[in-house]
Amino acid sequence: MKLAKSQQNTFHHIVGYSTLETFGYQVLTASDGTEALAQFATHRNVAVVITDLVMPFMDGVVTIRALRKLTPALKIICARGLADDAKAVKTARAEADAFLTKPYTAKQLLTVLAQLV
């Protein structure tokens, strides 16, 4: 199963990537929302997108909306930091299929994925 992950190069990005690959997921990465959309346009067989709420150029909410226009049934997980804007968090919760608050564990990530696929 292919997953697309759009997120800044952080500890959770690295841990999430290695965890997903260890459990048999094929992972595509992007550094921001615009790159994620480009990756998705090239690899349309992505089953789940994991996006950060706060990213440069295109934030998580805009990224989720753009992905939904391309593929309304696409499963999307949104990750957020504890200090993220409350309005953006509320909007992302309404538009994503699942939500993770950082720091999240490998077990939490895998549990959410199992619920979606």
Image (tube, rainbow, N blue to C red):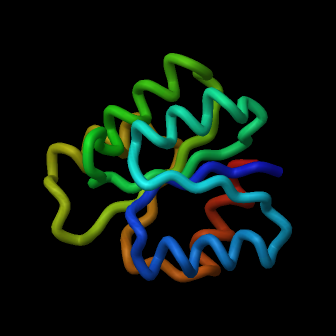
In the rendered image, residue 111, in percent from the top left (x then y), is placed at 67, 68
Q: Residue at x 81, y 73 (%)?
A: 23
**Quadrant in the rendering for residue 108:** bottom right
Residue found at the far top of this picture: 69
The reply, left or right, for residue 61 in relation to residue 68 is left
Judging depth in this view, the residue of 90 and 16 nearest the camera is: 16
Q: How many marks?
A: 0
Q: In this rendering, is residue 98 above or below 17?
A: above
In the rendered image, residue 90, in percent from the top left (x then y), is placed at 25, 45
Q: Residue at x 79, y 62 (%)?
A: 25
In the rendered image, residue 92, in percent from the top left (x then y), is placed at 34, 42
Q: In this rendering, is residue 84 above or below 74?
A: below
The reply, left or right, for residue 96 in relation to residue 110 is left
Judging depth in this view, the residue of 60 and 73 nearest the camera is: 60
In the rendered image, residue 70, in percent from the top left (x then y), is placed at 56, 19
Judging depth in this view, the residue of 116 and 80 nearest the camera is: 80
The reply, left or right, for residue 63 in relation to residue 81 is right
Q: Residue at x 79, y 78 (%)?
A: 22
Q: In this rendering, is residue 100 above or below 6?
A: below
